[in-house]
Amino acid sequence: MEDRIQIKVRGYHLDLYGHVNNTRYLEFLEEARWTIKEKYFDFPKTHDEGFGIVVVNTNINYRNYAELGDMLEIRTHLLKIGNKSAVFRHEIYLADSGKLIADADVTFVIVDRHSGKAIEIKDDWRLKLERLKQ
């Protein structure tokens, strides 16, 4: 299942050259993941139960640039689920033209917040994540 959000490029997103600063794309991707957490997981309940979703690796490819006023569409789906980690695939497009701006694979783990260790993804967690696979 692919989830989509839109973000409008604002002045504070830009670098010296008038393009979206590379670090801002990481924030855009995080916004997309928060939307998924809120939509598909009862995140406050998950947190209260002692679990967290933690990013452990991000690989991003910058394909084109975005400028002030551009509307970006971030498309996200779950690429794969392993034993202790899973990977979100993000693609950022210019909403009006469909031009690919960036793509990224973000690996995350589910941690037991009490021990600080990654848990095995099985049972209930696997079922929840399987709903997000494309």
Image: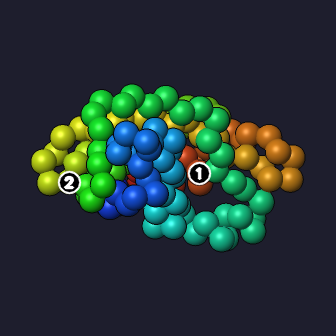
Q: Is residue 79 left or right of residue 64?
A: right
CA gap between label 2 and label 1 equals 32 Å
Q: Residue at x 78, y 50 (%)?
A: 112
Q: Which mark is residue 8?
A: none
Question: Looking at the image, which residue is at 43% across and 42% down?
Answer: 16
Q: Is the residue 19 above or below the residue 45 in the image?
A: above
Q: Amino acid at mark 1?
A: Trp
Residue at disc 1, secondary structure: helix
Q: Nearer the viewer, mark 2 or mark 1?
A: 2
Residue 62 pos. (x, y %):
36, 31
Classify residue 27 as left or right of residue 5. Answer: right
Q: State the image quarter where residue 42 is shown.
A: bottom right
Give the number of the disc on residue 95: 2
* Residue type highlighted by circle 2: Ala
Could you tell me residue 2's position as x and y percent?
31, 51
**Between disc 2 and disc 1, whose residue precedes?**
2
**Local crowd size for mark 1, using a 10 Å CA cut-off: few (<14), some (14–19), many (≥20):** few
Pick the residue in front: 126 or 28. Answer: 28
Task: Identify the residue shown where x is 30% and y is 30%.
Answer: 63
Image quarter hosting the C terminus: top left
Q: Residues within 10 Å of mark 2 (few under 14, many from 20)?
A: some
Q: What residue sits 46% from the left and 38% below the top?
A: 22
On the image, the x and y values in percent for residue 64 come to 27, 34
Closest to the observer: 122 or 65? Answer: 65
Query: Residue under circle 1?
Result: 125
Circle 2 SS class: loop
Q: Please name whichever residue, 11 or 28, is drawn nearer the observer in this view of the structure.
A: 11
The image shows residue 40, relative to residue 112, as above or below, that is: below
